[in-house]
Amino acid sequence: MFLIRLWHYLKGYVIIIVTGISAERFVNICTRRQILLWDMERLDQTTIQMKMSIRGFKASRTAARKSRCRVRIKAKKGFPYMLSKYKKRKGFIIGLIAFALVIYVMTSIIWFIEISGNSKVETDELISQINEMGIYRGATKRFVDPKLLADTLMLKNSELSWVGVEIKGTGLYITIKEGIEPPAVIPHDKPCNIVAKTDGIILSIHAKNGLEMVKKGDTVTKGQVLISGNIESLYPEFGNKQVHAMGEVIARTWYEIKKEVPEKRIIKRRTGNEYNKYSVYFLDFIIPLPAKENPFQLYETGIFDKTPVIGEHFRLPFGLTIQSFYEIEEQTVELSPEEARELVQTTAIRELNQLKAEGAEEVDRQMQLVTENGKEYITVIMECAEDIATMQEFGGN
């Protein structure tokens, strides 16, 4: 239905009033002559309102004479009539066309480049590499090949494990995923030992290649040989055999943090006072507007970009930047012993989770409260089970 109405609007149509005692005959004659009528509405016993195409209106004159009905145009609708309305206003038409061309040009250009997910590779370095490919702010979108750009960045930066490039509106969005640097790998044809990468108590040991040097329940220290790649023969005349040791060694390990229990806590909160500084920009050119100095001694800041946007993704290359300063005040709050201990314990556990090795599984947690020199301290000990095996070449440190 929408497409039909759109077609009629583009071709143009008229709303007519048919008056006469034989108005129905006018409709029947038009129908037989295949003149399209729609949205018919009876206004009274002798009057009918309807819509008709421009060509149909011209062809309906014979039907009006035969039915002895009076036909008059109530309104002219559609694109042709709208165009003829503005035909004499040449300045308006030229301005409209110029505006459309400017919008087309503005939206066919990349006005900003956004890179996310990178920490090891600097954003400025990636931007420089992108610029070397002829891609920069102001470049035409049709000359940008997202796949080629992603492949090039991957080849130039070994730290990257995946690069996604997407063009949305006037923006070039580059999503980075950086790989974790793998530990040094010793070739399989090179002899080595398996040593402990941290202290612990052996829970299980399974040697895939080499000689087990410890057993379940043994206490080991960092750097101690767990699986030896130097296998001695029972018969001295045959000498020793050196192999590439491999295996898994699960051990109990401990991570510990000691923190003082505070009696007070400083809370920062906003007072509600705010001060703003404004800047206008075009691409990388920023012009700060005249403003007074920030009147606050303690404050938080926030930067807001007021870039004009057409639709959802078509950002224009100019706009307004607002730097907001929010005044804050510090308030000292007395903590009860229970609140202070809970606060310290929560902080210590969060830090321990960041400290423990990747893949380590927590199996137990202990908390000790001690008093030293009149101050309380909490020690949180996290017991984990983890694989402590790591390869070491013969003679390595």
Image (cartoon, grey):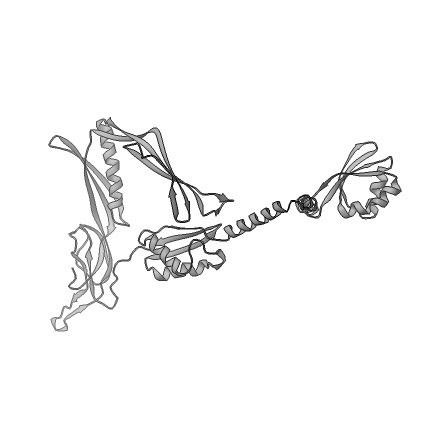
Q: Quadrant of the C terminus?
A: bottom left
In the image, taking residue 86 as reference, residue 114 lies left or right, namely left
Report which quarter residue 348 is drawn in: top left
Q: Quadrant of the N terminus?
A: top right
Count of numbered badges drawn on the protein? 0
Query: Could you say which is closer to the camera, residue 74 or residue 144?
Result: 74
* Residue 313 pos. (x, y %): 48, 47
* Residue 163 pos. (x, y %): 39, 56
Report which quarter residue 126 is drawn in: bottom left
Query: Could you say which is closer to the camera, residue 287 or residue 347?
Result: 287
Report which quarter residue 71 is drawn in: top right
* Residue 73 pos. (x, y %): 77, 39
In the image, taking residue 320 as reference, residue 357 lies left or right, namely left
Query: Could you say which is closer to the camera, residue 253 or residue 204?
Result: 253
Residue at screen point 42% across, 55% down: 136
Q: Is residue 316 above or below residue 269?
A: below
* Residue 286 pos. (x, y %): 38, 45
